[in-house]
């Protein structure tokens, strides 16, 4: 079992109290490296979730001024900075990503709380300069109400930071549901919130357990006014349908299928360097990593070899080993999906540039999938149509700018995209034509706390980060005053 000073209470947290499930049932959290049991967390359900919502609703009755919210946000930054190594270790153990990368995720998370603290003045009441109908008008930014924050397993602390920072800034009490695959980082975060801050009871609540019964309660309870979810488009559609009758506000960051377009005039070394950092972060298990590498036909072979030279230096192994670059995939399903995408591409004519077809996985752990590159990918292949979520680099070719953009947009998703070219005019044409909310221009960088991030098309709606993210849990109230 995982021993940590931040995991003294592997329990839920409701109304300021650490609690077990009413049934005393638990879920076991496993290390994806070897299947070792790390801890057990409560298998909570509708009753506990309802009490968490009620506690949050009660906390809403006592508003916190902006100054107090800023104090809380900055306190979280300090707590994260002081515990980055231990939080990173917990994250590494339950997710598998390298410890050094996990600590970077803690830093990334701290950035969202810092940004919100530094920009809270945006939520000050705003007096209109105009005097419509001989009245003075003021816009107040009120908390939207109780918010439900549902996070995925691939960024155990990064994803909750995006949501929780804006919720605290908006003064919205929260009910948080982490993934059952990686709940321990969230438990550790709550230990810090409980110890380091003076948050009132009910302000933040943690329910752990299976997604179905908890999610259904969050959708059906009328006091939950906003539901923020990061995950698959399939589940996002279900949430839209489930919450329609109660007209809840949703913020949804859903699936991706990111194109990574490399024109013939691009700096190929820079494009290859950026691809390594983009594609293999988290073992390729991110919604913003390049999923379809689209390279001009005149440089495709050259580019593939440059990527191979870099990828061959990456070490796959236990993330707790200091020289590991890529950890295991989260479970057997994730591993087998990458394997299926690889075999499908090869069966349909793709050329293997690096790697080989690994054996099927016998257990739900130990899914060490090596960096693999294929060339000659087409739109008929699964790796083109679906999000792979693993360290497979599928390279397709194009002949001209129009075709490159058409290929990039050949997906129902619109989350992240990337393009590399030395021609700024071409870049601006391409950026305006790409149907993605995030377009990296000569960079493979993903989201940042200072900038809004979200999806277009079936990648969802709403934004996290930037000033736009600050307003996701806000309801503007307009007050005209006469006399």
Image: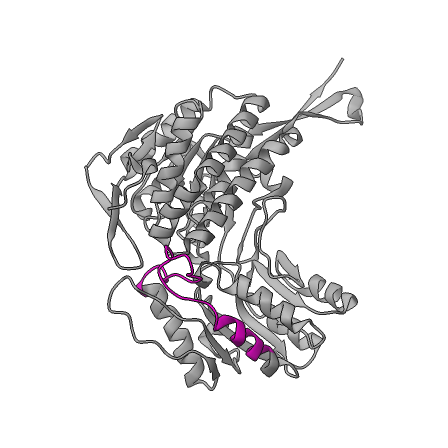
Quadrant position of residue 36: bottom left
Quadrant position of residue 113: top right
Quadrant position of residue 142: top right
Depth order, front residue of 73/347: 73
- Is any part of residue 250 visible from this angle? no
Prevailing secondary structure class for the magenta stretch in the rendered image: loop
x and y percent of residue 259 in the render? Answer: 58, 67
x and y percent of residue 80 in the render? Answer: 47, 37
User: Taking 150 as reference, is 121 left or right?
Assistant: right
Q: Residue at the spot x=44%, y=62% of the render?
A: 325
Q: Is residue 308 magenta?
A: yes
User: Taking 97 as reference, is 297 left or right?
Assistant: right
Q: Does the magenta stretch include residue 113?
A: no
Question: Looking at this rendering, what residue extends furthest in the bottom direction?
Answer: 349
- Does 455 appear above or below 366? above
Q: Residue at the spot x=39%, y=28% of the render?
A: 194
- Is any part of residue 110 visible from this angle? yes
- Does 273 appear above or below 17? below
Q: Residue at the spot x=44%, y=64% of the render?
A: 389
x and y percent of residue 427 in the render? Answer: 73, 66
Magenta stretch bounds:
303-332
- Does 32 appear above or below 111? below
């Amino acid at each position: 079992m995982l021993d940590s000073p931040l995991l003294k209470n592997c329990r839920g947290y409701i109304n300021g109290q650490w609690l077990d499930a009413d049934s005393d049932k638990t879920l076991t959290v496993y290390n994806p490296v070897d299947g070792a049991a790390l801890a057990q967390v409560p298998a909570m359900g509708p009753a506990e979730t309802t009490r968490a919502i009620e506690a949050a609703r009660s906390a809403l009755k006592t508003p916190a001024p902006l100054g107090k919210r800023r104090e809380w946000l900055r306190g979280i930054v300090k707590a994260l900075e002081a515990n980055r190594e231990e939080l990173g270790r917990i994250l590494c153990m339950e997710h598998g990503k390298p410890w050094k990368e996990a600590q970077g995720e803690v830093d990334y998370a701290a950035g969202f709380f810092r940004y919100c603290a530094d920009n809270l003045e945006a939520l000050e009441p705003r007096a209109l300069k105009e005097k419509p109908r001989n009245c003075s008008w003021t816009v107040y930014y009120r908390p939207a109400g109780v918010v439900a924050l549902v996070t995925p397993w691939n960024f155990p602390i990064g994803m909750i930071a995006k949501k929780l920072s804006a919720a605290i800034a908006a003064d919205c009490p929260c009910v948080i549901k982490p993934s059952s695959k990686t709940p321990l980082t969230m438990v550790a975060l709550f230990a810090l919130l409980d110890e380091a801050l003076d948050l009132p009871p009910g302000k933040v609540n943690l329910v752990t357990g299976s997604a179905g019964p908890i999610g259904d309660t969050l959708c059906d309870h009328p006091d939950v006014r906003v539901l923020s979810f990061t995950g698959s488009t399939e589940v996002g559609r279900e949430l839209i349908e489930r919450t329609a009758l109660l007209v809840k506000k949703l913020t949804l960051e859903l699936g991706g299928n990111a194109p990574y377009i490399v024109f013939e005039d691009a700096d190929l070394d820079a494009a290859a360097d950026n691809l390594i950092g983009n594609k293999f972060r988290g073992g390729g298990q991110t919604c913003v990593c390049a999923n379809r590498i689209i390279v001009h036909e005149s440089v495709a072979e050259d580019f593939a070899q440059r990527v191979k030279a870099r990828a061959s230096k990456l070490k796959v192994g236990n993330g707790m080993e200091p020289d590991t670059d890529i950890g295991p995939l989260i479970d057997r399903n994730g591993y087998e999906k990458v394997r299926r995408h690889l075999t499908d591409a090869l069966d349909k004519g793709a050329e293997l540039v690096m790697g080989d077809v690994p054996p099927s996985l016998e257990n739900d752990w130990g899914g060490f999938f090596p960096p693999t590159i294929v060339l000659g990918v087409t739109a008929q292949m699964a790796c083109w149509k679906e999000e792979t979520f693993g360290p497979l680099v599928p390279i397709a070719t194009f002949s001209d700018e129009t075709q490159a953009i058409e290929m990039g947009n050949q997906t129902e998703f619109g989350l992240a995209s990337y393009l590399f070219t030395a021609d700024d005019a071409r870049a601006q044409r391409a950026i305006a034509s790409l149907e993605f909310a995030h377009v990296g221009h000569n960079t493979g960088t993903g989201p940042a706390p200072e900038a809004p991030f979200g999806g277009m098309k079936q990648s969802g709606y709403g934004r996290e980060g930037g000033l736009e993210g600050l307003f996701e849990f806000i309801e503007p109230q307009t007050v005209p005053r006469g006399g």
